[in-house]
Image (cartoon, helix red, strand yellow):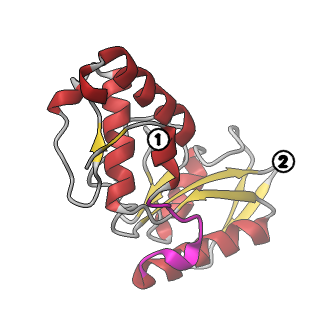
């Protein structure tokens, strides 16, 4: 039997913040980039790595109902996730529950159903530093980043990340992946 949607679903199918949960092949590149950042004096806060497909499903559809006027009754089902998005036909309750889920998940962007997080090939992280960041790229060349912003969106830092095979998705502030998606 399906259970009404709501914030209680947000603790089910937990995701990970651990770099250890990334695909082993890509994880080494991420670890090397993170090490270079830390050696250069950057502060890193990882907020997400692996995301189970069930979690992606819940995140995606609560966002769609809340922000893109998705009809709860038209949300496709997912095996293993017995959620009732319709709240028995109560559209106000359905929308309120979806809004509460968006808040509980702390969503800022439309979550993808085919995210690299599901494939263990994405990391969401906040990167900051003060003053100058001296960082070595994958080939060992030193880059001194003096320009703003002093965060993960800095174009010079994005190039350094790419040398490691850690590609910035420019439209999603914390998101980096193996291919920029």
Secondary structure, magenta segment, majority class: loop
Q: Which residues are magenta?
A: 13-23
- Closest to the camera, between mark 1 and mark 2, is 1
> Is 16 within the magenta?
yes
Residue 36 position in % (x across, y down): 68, 72
Where disc 1 sits, the SS reads loop
107 in relation to 162, above or below: above
Q: Of 130 and 134, which appears nearest the observer?
A: 130
For the residues labelled 1 and 2, say whether their Cβ atoms are less than 8 Å apart. Answer: no
Residue at the image position 26 percent from the left and 54 percent from the top: 114
> Is 30 within the magenta?
no
Residue lying at the far right of the rendered structure: 131
105 in relation to 22, above or below: above
Residue 58: image tag: none
- Is residue 180 at all visible to an observer of this figure? no
Q: 25 left or right of 148?
A: left
Residue at the image position 61 percent from the left and 49 percent from the top: 152
Q: Of 134 and 52, which appears nearest the observer?
A: 52
Residue 116 position in % (x across, y down): 35, 60
174 in relation to 93, above or below: below
Q: 76 left or right of 15?
A: left
| Residue position for label 2 | 130
Residue 167 position in % (x across, y down): 44, 59
Q: 90 left or right of 7?
A: left
Where disc 2 sits, the SS reads loop
Residue 8 position in % (x across, y down): 51, 44
Residue 63 figure quarter: top left
Count of numbered labels shown in the rendering: 2
71 in relation to 27, above or below: above
- Name which of mark 1 and mark 2 comes first in the sequence: 2
Residue at the image position 50 percent from the left and 30 percent from the top: 100
| Residue position for label 1 | 172
């Amino acid at each position: 039997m399906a259970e009404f949607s709501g914030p209680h679903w947000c603790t089910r199918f937990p995701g990970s913040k651990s770099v250890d949960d990334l695909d082993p092949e890509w994880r080494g590149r991420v670890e090397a980039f993170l090490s270079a950042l830390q050696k250069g004096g950057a502060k890193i806060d990882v907020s997400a790595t692996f995301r189970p497909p069930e979690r992606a499903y819940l995140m995606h559809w609560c966002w769609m109902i809340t922000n893109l006027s998705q009809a709860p009754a038209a949300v496709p089902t997912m095996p293993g996730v017995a959620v009732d998005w319709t709240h028995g036909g109560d559209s106000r309750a359905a929308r309120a529950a979806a809004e509460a889920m968006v808040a509980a998940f702390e969503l800022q962007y439309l979550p993808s159903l085919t995210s690299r997080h599901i494939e263990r090939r994405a990391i969401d992280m906040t990167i900051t530093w003060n003053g100058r960041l001296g960082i070595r790229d994958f080939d060992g060349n030193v880059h001194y980043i003096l320009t703003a912003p002093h965060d993960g969106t800095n174009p010079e830092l994005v190039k350094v990340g790419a040398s490691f095979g850690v590609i910035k998705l420019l439209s999603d502030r914390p998101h980096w992946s193996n291919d920029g998606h």
